[in-house]
Amino acid sequence: MNKIAKDHVIYAMSSENKPVLNVHSGDRITFETMDCYSDEVTPDEPDRRCHRINPANGPAAVEEAMPGDTLKVTIEKISLGSRALVGSYPNSGTMKELVTRRMIHFLPVQERQLEFRSDLIVKADPMIGVIGVAPQGKEVGCGTPGEHGGNMDCRKIREGSVVYLPVFHPGALLALGDVHAAMGDGEVMGSGAEIAAEVSVKVEVLKQACAGPWVTDQDQLYALASAKTMEEALKRCCQKMNCQLQRQLGCTPETAGMLMSLEGNSEICQVVNDLVTLRFGMPLVRFLSKEGNRS
């Protein structure tokens, strides 16, 4: 079994990171992840200040992956720990004028449910906050999203979904972490239900280029992009999707744009990191056929 234990972590994605596991295209890997606080905040020490946050488990090198390829990562299973935590932080998130106290709230996890209070039960919906490869240039902290993936906090990266990442360096150097037992789109308070977990994935190398991160689920294809503002991130998402539709359908930018207006959805992933992340989704069926109307 290909397994990376939780003590093999990185806090920045970089081509300088040494792989802790070497696998081949088609192999499966289980990542044993810490929570985003490096498992340091506990009910016994709820006020502990972490010296480092957002650890990612790995990296794993996929031997066939070379620059210019695409790494396909299928999320097969997310097994949650027994306790999650969620926090509020002054000067963080979208409610910084309202929030004046740092608070940590621990959530018991049982049968895919989170007990927020005895009278408030939240359904678990596990997802992966951080997943990425070594970036093209200098190292990027695991708390920052970008063209390499990273801390995108995309709620669509869950069991059954597929993540596509561009390969910039030999082996790709895949790492992941920051699992949430639940999180709403936007992560508006700056925290999901942070939790330790085991994540099982299948990795495959596609010998074709990939423009930044993409995600598919059962019926949608999502173009993801991160930028300083939501407007710029959305612009990049839409441009990526438009180009993909042009290639798939053999159509003009105008036709692709009109179809996007009819069937596409702009959605927020997160708005609390140094760069915000958005996604633009289109029905997956548009990309399953090689034939389309030309205009």
Image (tube, rainbow, N blue to C red):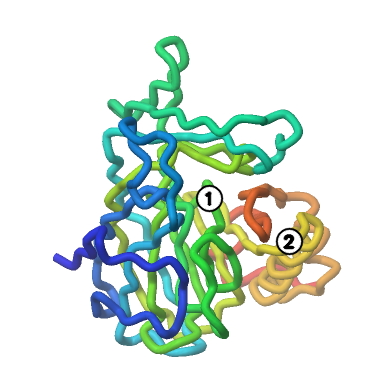
**Which quadrant is home to the C terminus?**
bottom right
Residue in the foreground of this view, choosing between 147 and 39: 39
- When asked about the image quadrant of residue 242, the answer is bottom right
Question: Residue 219 bears which disc, if any?
Answer: 1
**Label 1 sits on what residue type?**
Asp
Query: Total of numbered circles in the picture?
Result: 2
Task: Tell me: 204 left or right of 291.
Answer: left
Whether residue 210 is situated above or below residue 232 in the rendered picture: below
Task: Determine the residue positioned at 57% across, 63% down.
Answer: 144
Q: To which residue does mark 2 refer?
A: 233
Comparing 37 with 21, the one in front is 37
Can you give x and y, in whole percent of width and height, for residue 45 in the image?
35, 36
> If the image is split into quadrants, where does the N terminus sit?
bottom left
Q: Amino acid at mark 2?
A: Ala
Residue 284 position, x and y percent, is 57, 57
Residue beneath the point at 31% across and 74% down: 60
Closer mark to the observer between disc 2 and disc 1: 2
